[in-house]
Image (cartoon, coloured by chain):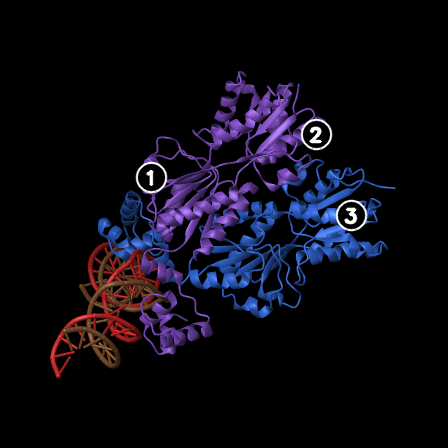
Chain colours: A purple, B blue, C brown, D red
Amino acid sequence: MNIKDIAKLSGVGIATVSRVINNTGIVSDITRAKVMAVVKEHNYIPNGNARNLKKTQSNTIALMVKGISNPFFADMIKEVERQVNLRGCPLLIQHVEDGVDEINAALHLVKEKNLYGVIFMGGTYDHSEEKFRQLPVPFVLTTITTTKDVDPSVFSSVVIDDIQESYKATSYLISLGHRNICFLARFPLVQNTTGNRRLLGYIKALEEHGIAYDASLVGDCEYSPSSGFTATKRLLNKKKDITAVFAASDTIAIGAAKALLSMGLSIPGDVSIIGFDGIEMAEYYHPSLDTISQPGVDMAKASVEILFDLITGQSDNKHTVFESVLVKRGSCRKIN
Amino acid sequence: MNIKDIAKLSGVGIATVSRVINNTGIVSDITRAKVMAVVKEHNYIPNGNARNLKKTQSNTIALMVKGISNPFFADMIKEVERQVNLRGCPLLIQHVEDGVDEINAALHLVKEKNLYGVIFMGGTYDHSEEKFRQLPVPFVLTTITTTKDVDPSVFSSVVIDDIQESYKATSYLISLGHRNICFLARFPLVQNTTGNRRLLGYIKALEEHGIAYDASLVGDCEYSPSSGFTATKRLLNKKKDITAVFAASDTIAIGAAKALLSMGLSIPGDVSIIGFDGIEMAEYYHPSLDTISQPGVDMAKASVEILFDLITGQSDNKHTVFESVLVKRGSCRKIN
DNA sequence: GAAATGACGGGAAACGTTTCCCTTAAAGTC
DNA sequence: GACTTTAAGGGAAACGTTTCCCGTCATTTC
């Protein structure tokens, strides 16, 4: 069942059918009704491949996600899809393995599928400006900050100020009297990752309060409970006098909390703990965990909005910074 | 840069370029090398739309997921994608909103994109056999059991035996001396959902041990911590003598645990609790939660295997039942 | 030495759309 | 009344592939 069949059955030309299903051009109401009736009756759905081929552009948006296991992204993904679908476009969600170059992956996809636009979510970004320029379609980096030597007019982004928010969390702990604050995040070898930036905020807060930075308080781990658990155990074995833990994600925080609790330490009695992201699980952990809560859904929505503004040419590349909030649930306490 | 350009630059015909990039037909090594050099040099990637149009079939697999927020599915999604990519195919992940008919959605996608195959994951299934027959491509239901009146030769599935596993969990609690066992799951109005089947297993265990079924011990909730939390609070306010909770998902179990703990009850001191799925968070909860652990990744892998066997015609529709394991972590204790 | 075979590769049709350009007829415009 | 304009819709080219069918040439086969 193709457009030719519909045309024949409706007694009109192919072009007219096309005009009807795409709502373009001028078609009389009577003809339109006739065609639509046939379309409905035969449950006709236009062949997307043919359409995209002809238009040399598909209406598909690709979402490249690194770290899909982190629940924080799950809600964002849902929102991105909702927003994209709202605009009549299908969303191609592509999970990018750790270590895979997402721009290359996107490039391939774009060429192969004539994508409309791309949203990158999660992961780390140290791609060169040249690399960015190779992407021939609009794209938005969500949750991703690039290295500073990339011309901001080359890309769009929706982010939080990692340094500032991390500074906020650390300062909060310091204000409660903590000095030996453990920091857990992922530090890949590339520069300017989320982990690195949050480390900068952590260090900034320490320095500002005259606390010496102690590298042995910093742990490298994946954004997962198991990894946070292991890293915390390791750190605790070396340093006995830790009074607070700042984890760069709630998933890590949960692992860290488990490590502390299973060693018989109480939260926040013995050790205070604060996470990052604002996933549901952190609230339902026992004790509920304090966190720097990111407006993930809003960020997802904004990403799609910016992307479509770019696609329709309504605006140029844009950089939006969202504010996170410090959510206190009682897993941090004042000491001394 | 299209196949014609590559042909021109390589000094060969279009057909030959096609043969080279698809590894079909007979091409001399020297010609192949010549063409490949040009392909590499210009970073040529064939236009998927044109290819799919011509072949009237794309190599894309669609994964229709309901309940993407449940971390249990996250790892399964990753595995599905890995397995599909391993076979050289892209995966289109489509999140299906609650209440949306996933078969219709898939049907649309299949027609529009000439899909290769579809995997359905999560959600509930009470589609008619006729509906299933409408899907013109191979498909596999993962994590989904259909109503019994559908001819098994019409579809493939990868499931666990919900009734049996639920029976296992309930029996375990009963064997520990529990009588007032609360059961939490989602009960949509449709028949034969995951929640309904697990309820059957729960009831079966009760009956077998001579315990009267008490509907006021059963709570209806979404598969999320917040919903589990609310449902548990509600139940506890009505029934004071609950000694155990069996949640149909770990996410619910976490919410339930939080409800118990925040009311000052201890786990497993006052109330024992067991979940379902085997997500990482359940292990890192404090206390670590017992659960019926499903082999999600294996199931994901099996789904893709079955799907590709169907696609290549290597085998007929197949139904695989995986075994879950009861993981004891100490959140259930013997009473009396 | 003629015929058959097989390796290799080219030309062109076809996949199902969109869209440009054209025709027709009715309605305005002066 | 002759002209232009406009609504409506049809024909056909083009998008970039794959693949069928065919031709050429070298090698066997008898």
Vertical position of residue B220 compared to residue A160: above or below? below
Nearest the eye: B222 or B147: B222
Q: Are marks 2 and 1 in contact (CB under 8 Å)?
A: no
Q: Nearer the viewer, mark 2 or mark 3?
A: 3
Q: Nearer the viewer, mark 2 or mark 1?
A: 1
The residue that appears at 52% across and 25% down in the rendered structure is: A202
Chain under disc 1: A
Placement of the C terminus of chain A among the 4 image quadrants: top right
Report x, y in % for residue A57. Answer: 34, 55
Amino acid found under the numbered disc labelled 1:
Val
Vertical position of residue A59 compared to residue B135: above or below? above
Query: Does residue B213 appear in this view?
Result: yes
Report the disc number at residue A262: 2
The CA distance from mark 3 to mark 1 is 58 Å
Residue carrying label 3: B237
Amino acid found under the numbered disc labelled 3:
Asn
- Mark closest to the chain's N terminus, 2 or 1: 1
Callout 3: SS? helix
Q: Is residue B76 left or right of residue B23?
A: right
Q: Is residue A86 left or right of residue B43?
A: right
Report x, y in % for residue D28. Answer: 29, 57
Residue carrying label 1: A154
Vertical position of residue A24 compared to residue A137: above or below? below
Amino acid found under the numbered disc labelled 2:
Ser
Give the image quarter of residue D3: bottom left
Nearest the eye: A302 or A187: A302
